[in-house]
Image (tube, grey):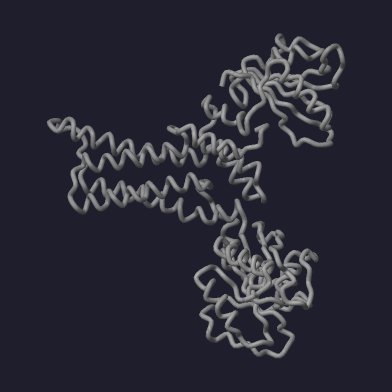
Amino acid sequence: MFDTICSIATTLGVGAISIIRVSGKEAISIVNNIFKGKDLEKVESHTIHYGHIVYEEKVIDEVLVSVMKAPKTYTTEDVVEINCHGGIQTTNKILEILLLNGCRQAEAGEFTKRAFLNGRIDLMEAEAVMDLINSQNDLARQIAINELQGYGSNLIKKLREDLINIISNIEVNIDYPEYEDIYEVTINDLKDKINDIKEKLEKIVKEYEDEKIIKDGITTVIIGRPNVGKSSLLNRLLNSNKAIVTDIPGTTRDIVEGNIMINGINLNIIDTAGIRESTDLVEQIGVKKSLDIIKNADLILLLLNNNQPLSKEDLDLFNKVKDKTSIIVVNKNDLEKRIDLSSLETNNIVYINTLTNEGIIPLKEKIAELFNLEKIMTKDFNYITSARQIAKIKECLNLISDIEMGIDNNVDLDLLELDLRHIWENLGNIIGESYDEELLDELFSKFCVGK
């Protein structure tokens, strides 16, 4: 935390501009040592200055240097940003000169980590920075911006405030039973207040799946026997010839992936190897991969042939996915119908023809209906979007269940108060009121180095 750190903040490659960011107590003086122009130690904060980076009396590049003085900066430390010409050699050379002049190479996410440790942002807001960088659609971007502005943090802080009020009243009742003019917490009061907090936490958990869809998209896996048209369906959905299509069963040996948007939500589509018994070692590996992918899929498209009766393999595949969100997609609807779907317990059936594109729009509409995408796009979210955050919320709900059981069993209020305090602490973990170094290291290691 006492080192002055530096890193390239833009994508390294050929471009118009690259930015090297420097943060720390010596940021201004170190850059000033290699800058030919105004004396950066005497300029006003939040100003930009033209000049050159010079090393060993040689001009390295023509630059603009932004000077931002503590505490009104991203890290709350002195921050200098060198805007140089884009290009790998020039950018790396300036970074090298900074390192030779006393800077240390920043670790992944260290700028944002310093912003958190210095109290400028909380842990939820820090995670929102990465969500914003990785947002794949406009709604995901908006949710990340809202979380970065503290919407989610304020929600958690309000719940903690409600809890501390309950805890304080219980403690006063226990410590000063002789006072008659204080508010007495009854079991019924506690029950009502806990139920209110429980409902709010359950709402967060319920909406998390929708938020996860916005953030990560819908992992969609196309499965079926060999040669039923899986690769053709992938190509039709993507509107491109990404997968190889032949009449030879087993052509697809490995997974093929692509992405489309439905109602502003990403559909991450995976075409799998045809699932069947095989003596071919490579095909066996492909089949195993397909079965592994099914376990983690959000949506399964089970492709069947309209002109063939259901086979044992078809039924086995249906039984593997019947408890997951799935759609039966019946291909080759231009041929004589020989398939009987009456034994399959599902209403999610779409008929298509991958030769003519017929049925592709109804299939997309069915996906939108299954995931309620129209409603998701207009929803007001609570902005709790990370698996870490939601795991803590679920821990809180488990503790509430223990409190409810304790109330039913007439457990003393002072014992119930311990669980209330644990809930309060867990919610504090979400926003970073308390944390351990391992958590921070893991969280910020996922950031790019310049952030």
Q: Which quadrant holds residue 312?
A: bottom right
Give the residue displayed 23% in from the left and 50% down from the top. 406
Comparing 447 with 122, the one in front is: 447
Q: State which quarter of the image contains the C terminus.
A: top right
User: What x and y, as percent, mark residue 245?
Assistant: 78, 72
Residue 149 visible? no
Residue 56 spot, x, y in % from top left: 83, 12
Residue drawn at point x = 66 percent, y = 33 percent: 449
List the single residue furthest toward the right.
58
Q: How many numbered discs, if any?
A: 0
396 relative to 289 in the view: left or right: left
Instruction: Locate residue 180 relative to residue 301 in the image: left or right.
Output: left
Query: Residue at left 17%, top 30%?
Result: 176
Q: Nearer the viewer, residue 171 or 392?
A: 392
Drawn side of residue 253 relative to residue 447, left or right? right
Seen in the picture, residue 184 relative to 4 is either above or below; the reply is below
Q: Locate the N terminus by quadrant.
A: top right
Q: Is 186 rendered above or below residue 326?
A: above
Residue 78 placement: quadrant:
top right
Residue 115 seen in this snapshot: yes
Above-or-below relation of 334 to 40: below
Determine which quarter of the picture holds residue 213: bottom right
The image shows residue 14 at horizontal and vertical percentages of: 84, 36
Q: Position of residue 404 (x, y in %)?
A: 27, 52
